[in-house]
Amino acid sequence: MRYSLRTRLLASFFVAIAIPLAVLGLYVVPAIEQATLDHLLANLTLTARLAAAEVAAAPEGVPLGAQINRWAHVLGVRIAVAVKGTAVTASRDLPAGITQEPGVATALRGSVAQGQIVDAGGRRWLYAAVPVERSGAVAGTVDLLLPLRSVEVLFSRVRWELAAAFGITAALAAGLVLYLTHALFSPVAALKAAAERVGAGDLEQRLPETPDELGDLARISNAMARALNERETRRRDFLANVSHELRTPVTNMQFTAQALLAGAADDPEQRGQMLEIIARESDRLARLVQQLLDLWSLQSGHLRLSRQRVDVSSLLADAAARFAARAHTADIRLDVRTPSDVSPIEGDPDRLAEVLDNLIDNALRSTPSGGAIMLGAYAVDGATALEVADTGRGIPDADLPFVFDRFYRGGAARDRASGGSGLGLSIVKAIVEAHGGGITVRSDVPGGTRFVIRLPSWSASADTGTMSHRGIETASAGAPPAEPRGPRAKGEEAPRHQRLR
């Protein structure tokens, strides 16, 4: 049988309460009763000794009956005195069922006798018998009997009062336990219900946060719900964006193909234009699918990087060469600045070339005729920084925090009409982070945009086959990058280490 945690906790509390009460009832109360009886018996024996001393000091032949009765009345006991040569004098008769003075035989032998006896009616008595000594010899005995009826009544009353106190205590403890378990498990039940609602898809569910451990659990649960909600929102947005991006080229190709089937193919000029549209849209569709696959591989950690020593000057020069003709056609100056002392970097040259291609392509889209694009590199904090800066129209401050988001097209250079998919900078960021680096962006409107990539420098141990990173700090978009050593300020002419036009 399966019991809930609340039931088990209640049972544990009740057991924890019941055990002390049982110990009190079964051990402590009888121990108190026995200690009381031992105390009474010790006092009775002491009283018998005092009476025996009085009897021993009394002159022989003097009657003791009146004195014995007075002692018995004051002490509330039965007293019997036996002196050799005289009859037994007693304050009253023996209890029913007791035929002889208890302990007398032992006392006549010179020892003290004490204990309990029970009469015919089941009543208990304490007795103490002590010898009466005269001239060093036993001359008689003094025997005291103390009825325990009043003591038993007192014990019975105490037991009932203790039982009542135990019952009240148990009831109060049970009430306290029920209150505490309710106070403890109400938030737990709320957490459970919230978790079930989150599991059912209600990601807006939030729990009240209190300043205790359950509040910490509620905060964790709320943070998890927020994270799941954000992830679900991003997933829906991503699917919506993907669907929209795929729909556009597919729809264009579909309408163009239908136009060709409807007779447009008979006109050679229209046929050529439409086939060109189909080719362009199919190329755009293939490029988008490939970018999605690349982005998934990068962000899921499935992409394997071929890390090796990469010469920064060659990396930048090759990137500039790939865009030299396009820059010349657009009348945009393309400068490359690589100081001679810049360190090689550790990374995958093909993926790093992809990063630079994306950034230069965006720069060319946003830079008007007569502008300039600068590629550079410098050392910063034990790492190597690559820089791509342009004099284009810039990115508004409101768009800067989102430029690396998938499908975001805040800037004019990233709209669909210009051919961009909105994935380029997301891929750039993923590739840089896969290398253990970081990327930042600064922009002025107007005035241009500056991307700075920080990558691990190639360490000396890497030449022996050991790769090592030197603590690269990954900055978020919009954060100000570290200033390069000797970058050009606005309006300052860049050093012409290499100029391609």
Image (tube, rainbow, N blue to C red):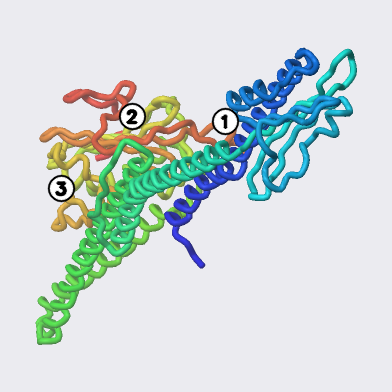
Three-letter amino acid code of the residue under disc 2: His
Residue 460: give its label.
1
Q: Residues within 10 Å of mark 1 (few under 14, many from 20)?
A: few
Horizontal and vertical percent position of residue 329:
18, 48
Q: Work out whether mark 2 precedes mark 1 in sequence or the reverse, and give the earlier one.
A: 1
Horizontal and vertical percent position of residue 448:
17, 35
Marks 2 and 1, how far apart in space?
A: 27 Å
Query: Residue 209 sits in which quadrant?
Result: top left
| Residue in front for this viewpoint, 270 or 91 | 91
Asked whether the viewer can see residue 167, the reply is: yes
Give SS at disc 3.
loop
Three-letter amino acid code of the residue under disc 1: Ala
| Residue in front for this viewpoint, 445 or 297 | 297
How many numbered marks, from 0 up? 3
In this view, 56 is above or below 426 = above
Observer-side mark, 3 or 2, equals: 3
- Which residue is depicted at the point 57% across and 36% down? 151
Give SS at disc 2.
loop
In this figure, which residue is indicated by the disc labeled 2?
497
- Which residue is depicted at the point 16% across and 73% down? 251
Marks 3 and 2, how far apart in space?
A: 34 Å
Marks 3 and 1, how far apart in space?
A: 42 Å
Observer-side mark, 3 or 1, equals: 3
Three-letter amino acid code of the residue under disc 3: Gly
In this view, 137 is above or below 316 = above
Q: Work out whether mark 3 precedes mark 1 in sequence or the reverse, and give the earlier one.
A: 3
Horizontal and vertical percent position of residue 295:
35, 55
In this figure, which residue is indicated by the disc labeled 3?
410
- Which residue is depicted at the point 84% across and 18% down? 133
In this view, 210 is above or below 58 = below
Asked whether the viewer can see residue 453, the reply is: no
Q: In the displayed structure, does residue 136 sit left or right of residue 448?
A: right
